[in-house]
Image (cartoon, grey):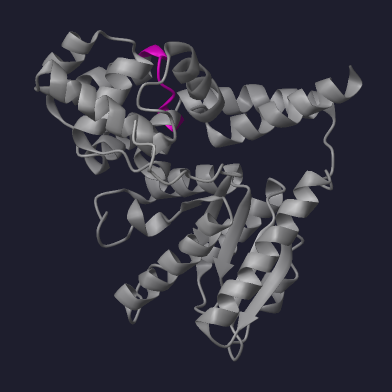
Amino acid sequence: MDEGRPKTPVALGEAYISGALTALDDAPRTKLFYELLAEIAEAAGLRAYLPHRVSDPVAAAHLDPRAVYEIDRAHVTGAAVVIAYAGIPSFGVGIEVELAREHAVPVIVVAERDRPISRLLLGNPAVVEVVKFADLDGLRRALTAALGAVAAVKRDGARPMVADDVVVQRFIASLEHARRLPADEVTALLRVGEVDGETAVAIKDAVQSGRLFAAGLRDLVGRYALRGPDLGAFVLRDVMERSLSETAETIGVDSRAARRHVAAARTRVGLPEDAEPDSVAQWLVTELIAPPTRALQLHLFGITKARL
């Protein structure tokens, strides 16, 4: 372990970066701006999710529309906050903000000072902050302050409570939904994750058997950006609990290389390279269940603890 390695701040949840992606006039520049929004969110202690890294209409043209909807929906509804760029009109942004409203996820709207913003968007109850900026320094300061305000509200428990029976019903429904994701989406995710051959077959088996939630695979590929041997090694070794030698054989490397891939994957998802099995198991339970399910779990457990 390198003692000189800078420590990663404890993540406060996921920040979904919402913005137009279809038919952009200057796609590279716009996506660079989205990366800046992600950088600001991460500096505030959040994990940033950028749709263009996973379901970009050009780079990921092979993903069918339903798969894109399901992937993005899961991340919006499981986010701690949505940062919605409204400088370019977008149907997708409007849909994502409405999904956030349905799941009580706060939204921060961001736009240049001289850009008009739809009153319908601004009137959405999910919108809790509006950041208008004239330059990037001003954007950094204002967005950082807005994220801090949202975090403070969450700490104070200002989110409306939901009746226990409704929470339980949604919890059960979200579990079933997580298991029933279409097989073609699993195939598409494996393609995005650059996994094929025996490794892809093993991961599909893990999904079909319930060892790995299909939505958990979505998180590994999308949220944590695991790819190729790192993805295969993590699922085989830590999710399916296969031996190191079996893992190595399946992904087509020697045991030493397999160990390196497992360590790299653990680091990317926020686990220590030498994490104990119990720590890995706890992470799988709390982090790799479908995001809506995880949010409902936390809500339900919060209600329970408050009554003890």
Q: Quadrant of the C terminus?
A: top right
| Placement of 234 over or under 292, stated as above or below | above
| Residue situated in front as seen by the camera: 253 or 75 | 253
Quarter of the view holding residue 133: bottom right
Quarter of the view holding residue 164: top right
- Spot occupied by residue 267 in the image (x, y as percentages of width and height): 36, 35
User: Is 214 on the left-hand or right-hand side of 152?
Assistant: left
Residue extending furthest toward the right: 307
User: Is 11 on the left-hand or right-hand side of 256?
Assistant: right
**Who's the residue at 65% across and 34% down the image?**
295
| Placement of 127 over or under 201, stated as above or below | below
| Placement of 242 over or under 4, stated as above or below | above
| Placement of 87 over or under 92, stated as above or below | below
| Residue situated in front as seen by the camera: 276 or 5 | 5
**Who's the residue at 69% across and 55% down the image?**
106
Q: Give the range drawn in magenta.
A: 209-215
The verdict on residue 210 being magenta is yes
| Residue situated in front as seen by the camera: 30 or 47 | 47
Q: In this view of the protein, can residue 150 be seen by the observer?
A: yes
User: Is 116 on the left-hand or right-hand side of 186?
Assistant: right
- Spot occupied by residue 170 in the image (x, y as percentages of width and height): 68, 29
Q: In which quarter of the image is the N terminus?
A: top left
Residue extending furthest toward the bottom: 114
The verdict on residue 75 being magenta is no
**Who's the residue at 14% across and 25% down the image?**
257
Q: How many labels does the image show?
A: 0
- Spot occupied by residue 216 in the image (x, y as percentages of width and height): 44, 30
Quarter of the view holding residue 226: top left
User: Is 264 on the left-hand or right-hand side of 152?
Assistant: left
- Spot occupied by residue 68 in the image (x, y as percentages of width and height): 40, 49
**Who's the residue at 64% across and 81% down the image?**
132
Q: In this view of the protein, can residue 204 be seen by the observer?
A: no
